[in-house]
Image: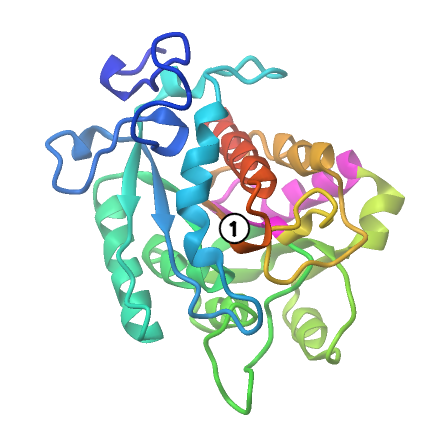
Amino acid sequence: MTSDPFFHPISGFDLPRFAGVPTFMRLPHVAPDHPRFGDVDVGLVGVPWDSGTTNRPGPRHGPRQLRDASTMIRAQHSVSGMRPFEMVNCADLGDVGPNPADIQDSMARITAFYDQLVGNGIRPLTAGGDHLTSLPVLRALAKDGPLGMVHFDSHTDLFHSYFGGTMYTHGTPFRRAVEEGLLDPKRIVQIGIRGTMYDSEDRDFAAANGIRIITIEEFFARGIPDVMAEARDIVGQNPTYVSYDIDFVDPTFAPGTGTPEVGGPNSFQALQVCRELYGLNIVGADMVEVSPPFDEGGGTAFLGVSVMFELLCAMLSR
């Protein structure tokens, strides 16, 4: 299959990678009011918002740094040989404009933006933003029924609330998503969980609702192929969302994040887990929590967009 040449990225052989206006993976910028918006199959979207952050802010700047780093992404996957930009029409759909002073209004804006994508049959690949970003995206994608989810992270994000009843933070999105019927808890697998804990409330919620947690100790003891085979079995062939927090990766390789946890996968393993998603029915995916103020050199962002390219290939592998 060869997609419309309008949607092909600019080659580094035609324009140096340091030149031009940066878009995700050098794709055309096709905003919702663009005449070709309805021709897009997969849309890359920035959500520059981190109002759910409870400690170190900065992911609101993630999409901009991720776009800049993504100029290094080329057209062909080095292992699978996939050429995703020739398989379907991909475009950078721009950023959702958040309200940095109002969490609820920002979430409504995000959901409204993604409603447009769903209405046009566009599958989203999102660059956050903190992890609360996933909740309003899921509100748009799961209108026809709950989704499964493969979740890479060092935290469960299943807490009930923070600070005596604050329900919407980057530590609560998937608790809310289960409560709202956006995710089927028995089709959720969380991989890489580790670090010191406030208590066991989040894990107790997971156990009570059938959410599978694979700790980093189990991840390393069993190995990636075995763990990911179980993950594929859990979500099956029904519609599935993939959420990837960059703090899944050890901070030696990805220091630019708000809540790093030592003892995680290396950068190759960060890519390898995505390659084990091939064949799933992925209706959307996100890469969140890249925080440029904590890695001004941009290495975390380059790893982040490399993961996004892997997720794009997994989305199209089916």
Picture coordinates of residue 77 (x, y %)? 55, 18
Numbered marks: total: 1
Check the image and report above or below for 84 versus 209. above
- Compared across the picture, whether 110 is left or right of 256 comes to left
Quadrant holding the N terminus: top left
According to the picture, the residue beneath numbered tag 1 turns out to be 292
Relative image position of residue 22 (x, y in whole percent): 34, 32
Q: Position of residue 47 (x, y in %)?
A: 37, 53
Which residue is depicted at the point 66% across and 63% down?
155
- Which residue is painted at 50% across and 67% down in the image? 173
In front: 122, or 192?
A: 192
In this picture, residue 192 sits left or right of residue 62: right
* 163 over 144 or under it: above or below: below
Residue kind at label 1, given as amino acid type: Pro
Q: Is residue 289 left or right of residue 67?
A: right
Residue drawn at 44 percent across, 67 percent down? 181
Q: Is residue 84 above or below residue 132?
A: above
Query: Mark 1 Cα within 10 Å, few/some/many (few <14, many 20+)?
Result: many
Residue range corresponding to the magenta coloring:
224-246
Quarter of the figure with residue 36: top left
Q: Is residue 227 visible?
A: yes
> Which residue is depicted at the point 53% across and 72% down?
172
Q: Is residue 258 shown in magenta?
A: no
Asked if residue 151 shows in the view, the reply is: no
Q: Quadrant of residue 265?
A: top right
| 237 drawn magenta | yes
- Quadrant housing residue 108: bottom left
Q: Position of residue 277 (x, y in %)?
A: 60, 35
